[in-house]
Image: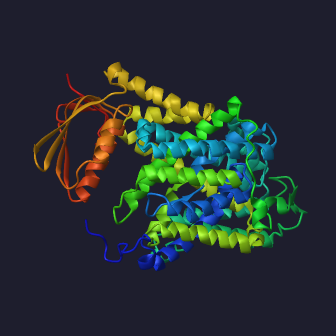
Amino acid sequence: MSTPSSFVLPKTGIPGLIENWRSDLLSGFLVFLIALPLCLGIAMASGFPPMGGIITAIIGGVVVSRISGSYVTINGPAAGLIVVIIDAVQALGQGDAMAGYRYTLAAIVVASFLQILLGVFKAGKLSAFFPSSVVHGMLAAIGIIIMAKQIHTLLGVKPAAKTLLATIAEIPHSLVELNPEVALIGFGGLALLIAWALIKQPILKMIPAPLLVVLTGLALGQYFDLDHIHQYLFLPDAEVLPHHEFTVGPSFLVAVPENFLAGFYFPDFSKIADHEFWISVVTIWLVGSLESLLSASAVDKLDPYRRNSNLNRDLTAVGIGNLIAGMIGGLPMIAEIVRSSANINNGAKTSWANFFHGLFLLVFVALFPKLIHEIPLSSLAALLVFTGFRLASPKEFAKTLAVGVDNFAVFVITIIGVLATDLLIGVAIGIVIELLIHLSRGLKLSNVLTMAYHVRQTDADTYHIEVHGAAVFSNFITLKSLLADFPEQKTVFFDLSEAELIDHTVMEFIHHYAHEYNHNGGKCEVVGLDEHHAYSDHHLAVHRKLD
């Protein structure tokens, strides 16, 4: 496969640094500008000190980039883990935020060991066990939770609610009681993000939207004098709204220590024997590992050089990074899609861009902590509300519905399950519902965990992969493992003529695999679906063989 002429393949033991340092350095700097406010916001939304997010991104860049199996991925804290971490802090701390933070650090350390083991024993393929509709439902639920919690911060109001559903129900009250100056900063940031998403001008798009939000927030924060506690009187039309006195001050700004080393905290393992501790460990481990694998795979599809990450090595590296982060006060990290996309768009060639992004963060927080302190919390909340909306946007609902009503039902039930219970139980509910739907369509119990397939080679360059029985999310791990090491640049036919049931997750995987295989110089076709019934007009819908 040829690569664009601007990319210089590594000629030394250092992976491309000498040949590509200019493009990687520039991209690393631009990603740093995006990462700084996001890391601060994600940390605070997770119940961690602001420096917790910065510490993680520094480790993800400076350490993980040197040992990972990816090329243009940016590692750092992600919005998708906010719900997991804040739940752990609240459950373990039982009202004591600092104690909950240190107990959660211990849970991150233990979860990191399990994550490392997943990578060492090449268990990255286990991500296949989660059906697509459930994963998308989980992410949409996380988006809803982020928006529900952060909109109060954006408005400058502290909700009295203690549960998620009560927090959602309290949004109208917060809108009525909003702090006008703080809300103006938050809504201004949100408007900037929406406008920037609609702009098509390539030169303007080079300016990171999160940077604009922070700069605008800094300017408005100075104008409203948030550095000093003071009251002001809001004087609306008395016939519509009563006069109201509001308080502003440093409590609406990011609180960071002036000494970078003072931001380090150490885990407390004293709850390691408690049931709640191990629930937190398993949740952080499973959700973190799943999100990292899915994100790394998604980033590979964006790489213009079509390189494939070593997911098992990448998972091990992220686990090592999380272990270090947990030991000194940081959040868990994953392969982060938004920052990775920006990295690719900015011209990154190798993993050194990730290294430089971490290095710029380290230098900035060590030299300019007072500038970070001037960032309004409502600006960071605007970034998170926008991120949450993208995870749970109407487009996600429409895309899921287009695949089929059954797919949409599992998606919505997973969302409701997560919102009504917690992340693990909600995901488990979604998986059970998906299995029940498949069983109602003829999936045999003997096929739930095992797939029957046969590889037939008709000549030196032609392979037929014949699938029998059912091919569903819970049983296609062995097929995925086979294809991971399949010969390249051959002719491959996926023969599904004898498959009784093929679900959306498997259809999606096979079609993506065929697309990548063809792009890399081979020939791959999916055949044998002529006698199958599709449950929607979508080409990736569930297919069942007609009797």
Vertical position of residue 398 compared to residue 209: above or below: above
Which image quarter holds the C terminus?
A: top left
Residue at point 50%, 35% (across, down): 412
Left or right of 207 in this view: 330 = right
| In-front residue for pair 209/360 | 360
- Residue 277, given in percent of the width and then of the height, sits at 68, 35
User: Could you say where residue 429 lies in the image, as x and y percent from the top left?
Assistant: 52, 28
Q: Does 90 appear above or below 72? A: above
In the image, taking residue 522 as reference, residue 429 lies left or right, namely: right
In the image, 26 versus 218, the foreground residue is 26
Q: Residue at x 78, y 71 (%)?
A: 370
- Quarter containing the N terminus: bottom left
In which quadrant of the rendered view does residue 399 lie?
A: top left
For the residue pair 337 and 415, the one nearer the viewer reads as: 337
From this viewpoint, is residue 212 visible?
no
Please name the residue shown 43% across and 51% down the image: 311
**Residue 42 in sight:** yes
Residue displayed at 64% across by 46% down: 109
Q: Position of residue 534 (x, y in %)?
A: 27, 34
Task: State which quadrant residue 526 falls in.
Answer: top left
In the depicted structure, whether residue 475 falls above or below residue 125: above
